[in-house]
Image (cartoon, helix red, strand yellow):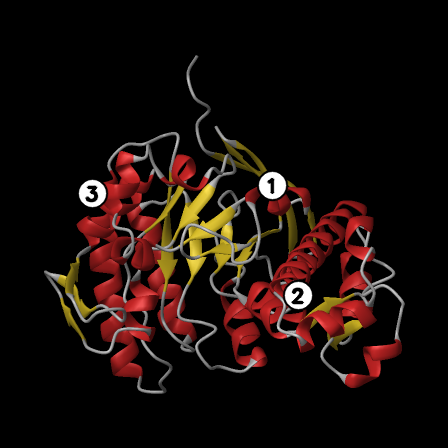
Amino acid sequence: MALKDFAFKLLKKDKSARLGIIETHRGNILTPAFMPVGTQATVKACTIDDIKKTGSQIILSNTYHLMIRPGVERIISAGGLHQFMNCDLPILTDSGGFQVMSLSKLNKIDREKGAIFNSHVDGKKFYLSPEESIRIQLGLNSDIVMIMDECPKKTTDYDVIKKSMDLSLYWAERSKKAFGINPQKALFGIIQGGLFNDLRISSLKGLENIGFDGYALGGLAVGETQQEMFDVLDNIKDYLPINKPHYLMGVGTPSDILGAVKRGIDMFDCVLPTRSGRTGLAFTWEGRINIKNNKYQTDNSPLDPNCNNLNLNKYSKNYLNHLFNTNEILASMLLTLHNINFYQELMSSIRDHIKNGTFNEFHDKYVAIL
């Protein structure tokens, strides 16, 4: 039987907020959607079965980290990333460009060779060209592949951002050629341009001329304010192709997500729910909780009484506080799972309210709380 081709369908709009569905041969993804981050072929402190129980429909994994450890050839020998990590959900892999910028102790960008960098693990030299990034992602058997781009650090230097954007467009062409024809997979372009509105629009138009299955906004979540990010989205939302998914990379807090959905974004990923879970910060419908605070030592109420996943309400704040203060591994496991579940409940509520035409009211009620 032939595998289903990748497709996106827009089901409804509530002003600029969009309800849609991404179809893949591994399952459908209702949007707006949040992708838990599985950096090292694992969502930290969680099993895939637990991730699925939260309603997660797709996860993200990291090209940079997997090429360094364990190496793509080892994953190919296991049958691909899904088999390697026992995951039957769709997987999106990033291209590695952001990590080259943020993690490498020494890196150099060459227009033809790509990124030349030293591993943050052992200093070994790597070369990551657009073609190599695509080869790795196809070897991982990713369902959604990201083009190789240069992710510059935040700067107000227009010429620096323009040069980087032009390079990313050149690499986008090379990525598209290396990807070839893979109808069961998707290749997403990445819009660059920093905080400069004209460069963002120029980048998008250049990518549309090449042609991609989805369009991501990169170069954000790198130190700009929330309002600066929203200004970028406000400027570009009416230019984004209506029949393709819109992905905001590396974002973010619940209020970031609410504001971005309001501006037409369909897909999100961020390490925040898992990283926060490992440090004792819980996201709840009543706001954020630092469970390590001493005031919870006598609080026997559940972490979030409004959580729909009753399995996560078996454990009191008192007990969770004890686990964190005694450095028990279970503390990270329970709070990480709680946070991912909260994010998925948030996304489900967002979808319901877009469907019912009440998203703006929902946004206004929770944007300041969450």
Horizontal side of residue 33 vs 204, given as left or right: right
Residue annotated with mark 1:
49
Give the distance between the C-alpha atoms of the residues marked 1 and 3, in whole angstroms: 34 Å
Q: 152 or 230: which is nearer to us?
A: 152
Q: Quadrant of residue 257?
A: bottom right
Residue located at (32% from left, 53% from top) = 66
The x and y percentages for residue 132 are 19, 50
Residue located at (76% from left, 57% from top) = 359
Q: Quadrant of residue 259?
A: bottom right
Residue extending furthest top?
1
Residue located at (63% from left, 46% from top) = 50
Q: Amino acid at mark 1?
A: Asp
The x and y percentages for residue 85 are 44, 42
> Is residue 47 visible in this depiction of the protein?
yes
Residue annotated with mark 2:
331
Residue located at (17% from left, 56% from top) = 129
Under circle 3, the secondary element is helix
For marks 1 and 3, give the one nearer the viewer.
Answer: 1
Mark 3, Cα crowd under 10 Å, few <14 / some 14-19 / many 20+, is some
